[in-house]
Amino acid sequence: MEKKFVGVRLKAIRGQSMGAQQRHDFRDRSPGYIETPAPPEVLMGGKFDIKKASQEMAEKYKAEQGRKLPSTTRQYITGVIYFSRHQVEKVMAAPGGLKAMNERAIRWVKDFAERIGSQVRYLVRHDDETVSHYQFALDNVVGGKTVMRNLTREELSGLQTSIAETYAGLGFERGKKGSRDRHKTIGQMHAAEFLGFEREKENLKKEIYELKLAITESQKIAAELKQQAHQERAKLKTDFMRDLREIEKLQREIEGMKKQRAEEEKAEAREKLTELIRAKENLLEREKENLKKGYEADKRAFKGRWDLER
């Protein structure tokens, strides 16, 4: 006989675990047990800031109860609506089947949240696992109390009845009380999931360790680069001062050469002037001799004329 059951499983978890659950439900991190992960179809809500939501929940609890929310409080309810594989595949293959499945999931989660006075954080559908199913999350702290702790066995059993009634029109029925089919199917469907969580946690630890190593290595490289930069700056400063001293030395040499050249030019000028003066003096001496000779000649000529006239 073909199985046509539908059921719901609830679990209360702490805020710290909600992060991993949300990453799993939205496929932010690929579960290790799924070959080809696919983004879920989001039917209600969406990813939320867990830290902020938990803080607001704690503040509301303190305002209502006058004391802090215990650190061990399981602040969120996560749930799975699951189906027998044959029937869910049959329904989804029929025209309008997927839409009908989604509408019933939304209606049931809304009704359940209103019944306990909680807030729906999200509702998504997964089609990338062996059997299509829905995952949802709600607040577990309502009116200063934790919902799951106060649900009786009868109420929990009633949830199985209500989900079956919601999907009855699609050929699903409530699993038999005490039957191991439901537990076995969920165990098969999620055993790998829990193992995947563990692997994911180990992978996260490994990534954190590798990040720490990378950070340490980056810090080491940064320190080495800083030291190299310091050494380069010191070397550049030393080279600059050496070059500056060389430039100053060259400037002094140039000034000395200029001074020496000026002195040499002065000496050359003095020598040329001396030669010019000497040449002028020689010229004057020659002129003087010529004048003297002319005077003597004139004197002799005058004397000869004088003697003749007498």
Image (tube, rainbow, N blue to C red):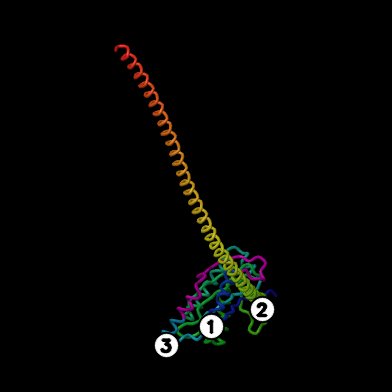
Q: Nearer the viewer, mark 2 or mark 1?
A: 1
Tell me which amino acid carries mark 3. Gly
Q: Residue furthest top?
A: 309
For label 1, the SS is loop
Whether tag 3 and tag 2 are in contact, CB under 8 A, the answer is no
For label 2, the SS is helix
Q: Which residue is drawn at the image coordinates 35% and 22% (left, top)?
A: 295
Q: CA distance from mark 2 to mark 1?
A: 23 Å
Q: Position of residue 37 (x, y in %)?
A: 63, 66
Numbered range of the magenta stretch: 29-57
- Residue that carries the numbered disc 2 in the rendered image: 187
- Residue that carries the numbered disc 3 in the rendered image: 66
Left or right, 173 with reference to 117: right
Q: Is residue 39 magenta?
A: yes
Residue 68 in sight in this render: yes
Q: Which residue is drawn at the image coordinates 56% and 86% (left, top)?
A: 154
Q: Residue furthest front?
A: 310
Q: Nearer the viewer, mark 3 or mark 2?
A: 3
Left or right, 126 with reference to 138: right
Pointer 1 or 3: first along the chain: 3
Label annotation for residue 74: 1
Residue 83 in sight in this render: no
Tell me which amino acid carries mark 1. Arg
> Where 154 falls versus 272 (above or below)?
below
Tell me which amino acid carries mark 2. Gly
Whether tag 1 and tag 3 are in contact, CB under 8 A, the answer is no
Label annotation for residue 113: none
For label 3, the SS is loop
Q: Is residue 296 magenta?
A: no
Q: Position of residue 278 (x, y in %)?
A: 43, 33
Q: CA distance from mark 1 to mark 3?
A: 19 Å
- The foreground one among 75 and 138 is 75
